[in-house]
Image: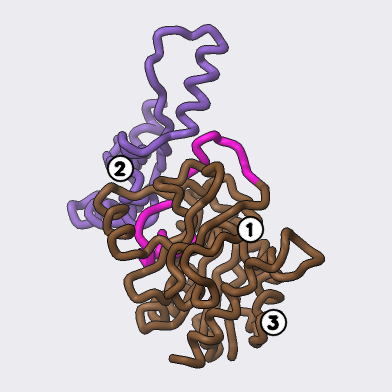
Chain colours: A purple, B brown
Amino acid sequence: MARVVVDVMPKPEILDPQGKAVHGALDRLGFGGVADVRQGKRFELEVEGEITEERLAEIRTLAETLLSNPVIEDFAVRIEQPVSEAGLDA
Amino acid sequence: MRVGVVTFPGSLDDIDAQRAVRLAGAEPVALWHGDHDLKSVDAVVLPGGFSYGDYLRCGAIARFAPVMSEVVDAANGGMPVLGICNGFQILCESHLLPGALIRNDHRKFVCRDQRLRIDNAATAWTSGYEAGDEIVIPLKNGEGGFVADDFTLDLLEGEGRVVARYLDDNPNGSMRDIAGITNERGNVVGLMPHPEHAVEELCGPGTDGLPFFTSVLSALVNG
């Protein structure tokens, strides 16, 4: 098993009301020096078997069709270390 | 005339939409999200609510409901389809309409009677109006901000595909005050406010919403 992480972020030109709300709260809490906040989503896919180029291409299609909406969001796909190794390290 | 109303898990306004269809003089037909069958309806309404809990994004999971592949095929074949609120979001996610709907710019849920101007009275769902008509129907949404890139917005304006625009205050930050749009052919319409809640004098702000449902009947009769 391997873990594939898909990060989805609102496009820079799209208004992000959630990020704005968080940014407003930072000011109220006294955390200065943060110029802007954008809020996105992180998906962790536990994928069975080897991660081949073909498999990765499928996941990119999945990220583009379901996990993100290309009209308003960008996405990035990356492979994290195999889940079994991560378990051994811990 | 048989007008189907799809119920997704989390739909809220399906029964109101069926009632509006009945008051307009057609036979409402309940359609189920898990079915691959449109039951020989002549038109389809995707109602408001929170399909599949609106997890992931509004309308994103509903787009992949079994019944939606039938709806998309029928819409591409010319069948009239009206998406109201969550239904509008589903139509955008299904690529039957361009653009997307994002969280309201002021971050609050809005629920109020909304004044609109009908800009396009030539669609299957708005022929009962005159272009320029001003109407009042309820609006209730948390993610009703219509967004698209400038090219798409210019295209929609240039082709007269903005069906309805907000008057007075823009309730959700929609670009160019857009409340509803149509596809190129005019059979698919997405609308953020709720005409099905303004079809009887007793309930709601009046009957300004009823022509959406009577329009489609004349569209079907006149082919």
Same chain for the residues under marks 3 and 2 in the image: no
What label does residue B22 carry, if any?
Answer: 3
**Percent position (x, y) of residue A53?**
18, 52
Q: Residue at x 55, y 88 (%)?
A: B39
Q: Is residue B183 left or right of residue B191?
A: left
Estimate how packed mark 3 is, as few (under 14), some (14 to 19) or many (20 or more) residues with alpha carbons within 10 Å.
some
* Residue identifier under label 2: A74
Seen from the viewer's position, the closer of residues A77 and B104 is: B104
| Amino acid tagged 2 | Asp
Q: Is residue B60 above or below residue B80?
A: above
Q: Position of residue B59 (x, y in %)?
A: 49, 58
Which is nearer the eye, A87 or B2? Answer: B2
Disc 1 versus disc 2: distance between alpha carbons? Answer: 37 Å
Q: Residue sitting at 59 percent across and 91 percent down?
A: B1
Give coordinates of residue A2: x percent, y percent.
33, 44
Could you tell me how many numbered marks the image carries? Answer: 3
Front residue of B94/B164: it is B164
Q: On screen, B108 above or below B72? A: above
Which mark, by number, is residue B136? 1
